[in-house]
Image (tube, rainbow, N blue to C red):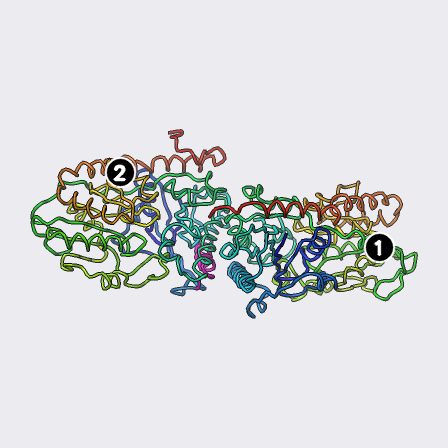
């Protein structure tokens, strides 16, 4: 079985998956990628064992990180053209299946012109028209694209799905974000969490070179970017309140200063949402450790020290950090939104509180800090949830089976 | 009623006019482009108000790269939204939009989120079938198919915009992805039939020229003389007939510049001139091309025509076909799926496979040799159009649907064509 995997960044959702498919089942996985990611960075064995080919994108593609909403579809088409050209440049590449994903939308659109094999898209998310994702933070200054963006941004997903392309989503809620008419063609298969790496480990109590005394409790917050969609500002308000109540708590924050989703820059008028948040609160920054972006091994070590992990997302694509935290046996307090509830059953394997309710979030955090033993069963159940439903051991065989089924399907007639 | 279409009167102008005139609607018609006054319907300023919106960005450019097609449409949608947001027409019961690939109604719900929205859907471009794919496809650069695969983005956004989808024919519906087809109301928007008058045999004139007595007339009408509507096939047929007959005049009405962007090779070019340079006619004096003509002249032409030829490629049937049939023309058409819903071979016209060149010539000769005995085909066609495709036949059901939507959107059985609550 030969799978061609396409993604602008490597390894993203596919690197580990491909490695496992090659090692466990002897499959061949070839990649078409534009750049190496640092979130997460590729493991050395991925670079040595997997066949990577370059995806050439025009320079202007990179120069427009914040594309005006009317041009988003054109940008996606540029990516689709690049993928077409990339596959064309591999005349000996005759895959049994193509699996693709990209931050600029599904890049498979033109491949039926080149390849006869089935095509599968990673259906990460379909933006909602209101009360969700980008439009959920009604507490922040409104931005002009809020009304128009959701009515236009899904165009690339729609042309792909309408062309008969099959897909899979990592969670049921993400699948359900797509129009119901396409649900029969989108299965739910999670990427897989490395439970060996992400497990609670004993070791020196040290974060970013700083020794952490035994009596110091750690509250963690992790996001790819410290931005409003992931509730960084809400976390800071909760942390501020907790800090006032408990002198022995340190807040460890991992994530870059960038905004990856949404319009924080437009909304607050400054380049960095993190700085805007810090400028608008009375925070005792000596109680915070801002770690920036950290690599998986550091993240596993950080989460191993966590007494409470806050995951305060709006209804949107679930972050790997939530799964990583659960896998590391953290007591997780999540925002009470549908995608989080798909994973966290409140009082069983974690806690949820309303995103905008600072009082309740604070209260819940304090309760966990005050009586860790009471909440330890939740942490253990969280770990079991990952092992039983989201681990590589569960996910890889499912995805292997799914890919095999898809590869054996005839492509729909056009 | 709020109608939104890139051009007024466009396609929806006639519908709006009928609703104003026959059902007492008040209609605001928002459009970016306004056609000349002689094309305006009668109810203008008598219940039908036209409001022009302007467009910005790439929509101001005469042409855009195919990758910018959606961006262009979004500029139309945004331009419409700006004016709507300022004027906020009220009271409003229903929005009726037609994007025609330009998406003008896409943002109407931003201003009027709770008003039912109906979208008139024309044509879903399939990547490898339909329209001119058989002609352009072989040897076409990859960009041709890439464009076709991306071209439906606006239609899909419209369909996901909470609309009630409406399309005139089952064939048009069948071109849309399976996932959407069940949601369509299939109902012709209808035409205003032309009079089916007695056919003059003497003192015949058209476009300022006299048609000698005894001359047969073979006609072709399209918005532009292009391959999509089979102008090349018409010329090939006429070339054979002109060689064989001296008693025949060919009249082709339509803009010589190709108007439809689906013909990527000849768009905005004088295809007719290029074609006729390549296809010398035995007697070019008997091949008339008067350009576009007003509706009154069209009625005159159809009354003169002994045979109307409709050799269109697979594409939604043109209004000119319906009008020719309504005027009682004997129609010889290419046997393509879209035509089947309108014309029945041997009853309301004649159908032949598009590539059966000899059969076209002999069929045309048979009609031209004996027009009288073929008249029943034209008369049946005229009756069929009045009964099934006239506005008076089609739009009462649409008006009923609109009333149901406006009064209780949730309980409207939108897709059913059975008369309800009348």
- Give the camera-side residue of B271 and A178: B271
Secondary element type, mark 2: loop
Q: Please provide percent x and percent y for residue A197.
A: 80, 55
Q: How far apart are marks 2 and 1 (CA)?
A: 79 Å
Q: In which quarter of the image is the N terminus of chain B?
A: top left
User: Where, by quadrant of the figure, is residue B414 drawn?
Assistant: top left
Q: Position of residue B221 (x, y in %)?
A: 24, 51
The structure residue drawn at horizontal position 77% and vertical position 54%, both measured from the top left corner, is A238
Mark 1 closeness class: few <14, some 14–19, many ≥20 residues within 10 Å = many
Quick check: B230 left or right of A86?
A: left
Q: Does the magenta stretch include residue A3?
A: no
The residue under the point 39% across, 58% down is: B138
Chain ID of residue with mark 2? B
Q: Where is residue A155 in the image (x, y as percent from the top left)?
A: 52, 53
Q: Quadrant of residue B72?
A: bottom left
Residue extending farthest to the top is B421
**Which mark identifies residue A339?**
none
Q: Residue at x 88, y 57 (%)?
A: A247
Where is mark 1, residue-wise?
A: A304
**Residue B387's x, y, as percent?**
27, 34
Q: In this view, does A122 lie to the left or right of B311?
A: right
Considering depth in this image, is A149 or A178 the residue closer to the camera? A178
Residue A138 in view of the camera:
no
Q: Quadrant of residue B187?
A: top left
The residue furthest right is A214
Which range of residues does the magenta coloring cover?
Answer: B65-83
Residue wearing tag 2: B345
Q: Is residue A334 left or right of residue B325?
A: right
Do we see residue A296 in this rendering? yes
Frontmost residue, B160 versus B225: B225
Horizontal side, residue A198 vs residue A93: left or right = right
């Amino acid at each position: 079985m030969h799978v061609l995997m396409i993604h602008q960044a490597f390894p993203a959702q596919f690197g580990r998956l491909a490695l496992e498919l090659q090692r466990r089942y002897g499959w061949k996985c070839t990649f078409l990628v534009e750049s190496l990611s640092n979130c997460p960075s590729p493991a050395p064995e991925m670079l040595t064992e997997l066949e990577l080919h370059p995806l050439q994108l025009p320079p202007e593609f990179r120069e427009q990180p914040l594309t005006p909403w009317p041009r988003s579809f054109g940008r996606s088409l540029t990516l689709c053209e690049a993928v077409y050209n990339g596959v064309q440049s591999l005349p000996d590449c005759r895959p049994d299946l193509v699996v693709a994903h990209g931050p600029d939308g599904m890049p498979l659109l033109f491949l039926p012109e080149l390849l006869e094999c089935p095509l599968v898209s990673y259906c990460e998310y379909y933006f909602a028209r209101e009360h969700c994702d980008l439009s959920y933070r009604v507490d922040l200054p409104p931005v002009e694209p809020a009304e128009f963006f959701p009515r236009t941004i899904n165009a690339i997903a729609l042309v792909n799905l309408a062309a008969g392309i099959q897909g899979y989503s990592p969670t049921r809620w993400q699948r359900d974000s797509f129009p119901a008419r396409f649900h029969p063609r989108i299965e739910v298969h999670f990427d897989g969490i490395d439970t060996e790496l992400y497990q609670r480990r004993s070791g020196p109590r040290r974060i970013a070179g700083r020794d952490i005394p035994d009596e110091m409790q750690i509250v963690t917050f992790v996001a790819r970017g410290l931005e409003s969609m992931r509730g960084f500002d809400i976390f800071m308000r909760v942390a501020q309140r907790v800090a006032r109540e408990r002198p022995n708590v340190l807040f460890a924050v991992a994530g870059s200063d960038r905004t990856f989703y949404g319009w924080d820059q437009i909304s607050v008028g400054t380049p960095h949402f993190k700085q805007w948040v810090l400028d608008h609160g009375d925070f005792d920054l000596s109680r915070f450790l801002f770690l920036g972006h950290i690599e998986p091994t550091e993240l596993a070590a950080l989460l191993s020290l966590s007494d409470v992990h806050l995951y305060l997302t709006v209804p949107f694509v679930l972050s790997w950090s939530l799964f990583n935290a659960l896998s590391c046996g953290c007591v997780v307090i999540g925002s009470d939104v549908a995608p989080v509830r798909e994973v966290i059953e409140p009082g069983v394997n974690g806690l949820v509180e309303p995103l905008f309710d600072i009082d309740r979030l604070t209260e819940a955090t304090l309760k966990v800090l005050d009586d860790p033993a009471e909440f330890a069963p939740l942490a253990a159940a969280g770990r079991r949830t990952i092992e039983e439903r989201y681990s590589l051991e569960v996910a890889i065989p499912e995805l292997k089976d799914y890919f095999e089924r898809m590869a054996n399907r005839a492509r729909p007639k056009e | 009623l709020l109608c939104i279409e890139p051009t007024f009167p466009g396609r929806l102008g006639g519908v709006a006019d009928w609703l104003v005139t026959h059902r007492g609607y008040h209609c605001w018609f928002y459009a970016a482009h306004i056609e000349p006054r002689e094309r305006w319907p009668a109810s203008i300023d008598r219940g039908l108000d036209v409001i022009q919106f302007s467009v910005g960005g790439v929509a101001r450019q005469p042409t855009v790269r195919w990758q910018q097609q959606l961006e262009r449409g979004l500029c139309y949608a945004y331009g419409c939204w700006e004016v709507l947001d300022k004027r906020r027409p009220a009271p409003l019961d229903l929005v009726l939009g037609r994007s025609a690939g330009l998406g003008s109604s896409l943002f109407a719900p931003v201003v009027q989120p709770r008003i039912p929205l109906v979208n008139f859907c024309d044509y879903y471009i399939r990547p490898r079938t339909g329209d001119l794919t058989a002609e352009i496809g072989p040897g076409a650069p990859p960009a041709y198919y890439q464009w076709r695969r991306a071209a439906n983005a606006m239609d899909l956004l419209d369909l996901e915009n909470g609309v009630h989808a409406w399309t005139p024919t089952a064939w048009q519906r069948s071109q849309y992805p399976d996932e959407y087809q069940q949601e369509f109301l299939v109902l012709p928007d209808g035409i205003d039939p032309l009079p089916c008058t007695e056919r003059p045999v003497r003192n015949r004139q058209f476009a300022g020229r006299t048609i000698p007595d005894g001359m047969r007339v073979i006609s072709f009408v399209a918005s532009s003389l292009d391959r999509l509507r089979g102008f090349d096939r018409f010329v090939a047929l006429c070339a054979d007939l002109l060689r064989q007959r001296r008693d025949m005049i060919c009249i082709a009405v339509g803009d010589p510049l190709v108007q439809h962007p689906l013909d990527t090779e000849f768009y905005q070019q004088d295809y007719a001139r290029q074609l006729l340079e390549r296809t010398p006619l035995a007697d070019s004096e008997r091949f008339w091309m008067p350009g576009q003509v007003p509706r009154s002249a069209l009625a005159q032409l159809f009354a003169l025509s002994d045979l109307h030829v409709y050799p269109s490629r697979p594409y939604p049937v043109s209004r000119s076909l319906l009008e020719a049939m309504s005027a009682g023309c004997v129609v010889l058409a290419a046997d393509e799926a879209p035509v089947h819903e309108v014309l029945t071979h041997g009853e309301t016209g004649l159908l032949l496979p598009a590539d059966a060149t000899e059969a076209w010539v002999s069929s045309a000769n048979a009609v031209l040799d004996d027009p009288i005995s073929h008249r029943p085909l034209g008369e049946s066609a005229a009756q069929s159009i009045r009964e099934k495709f006239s506005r008076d036949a089609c739009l009462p059901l649409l008006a009923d649907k609109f009333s149901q939507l406006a009064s209780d959107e949730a309980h409207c059985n939108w897709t059913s064509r059975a008369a309800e609550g009348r």
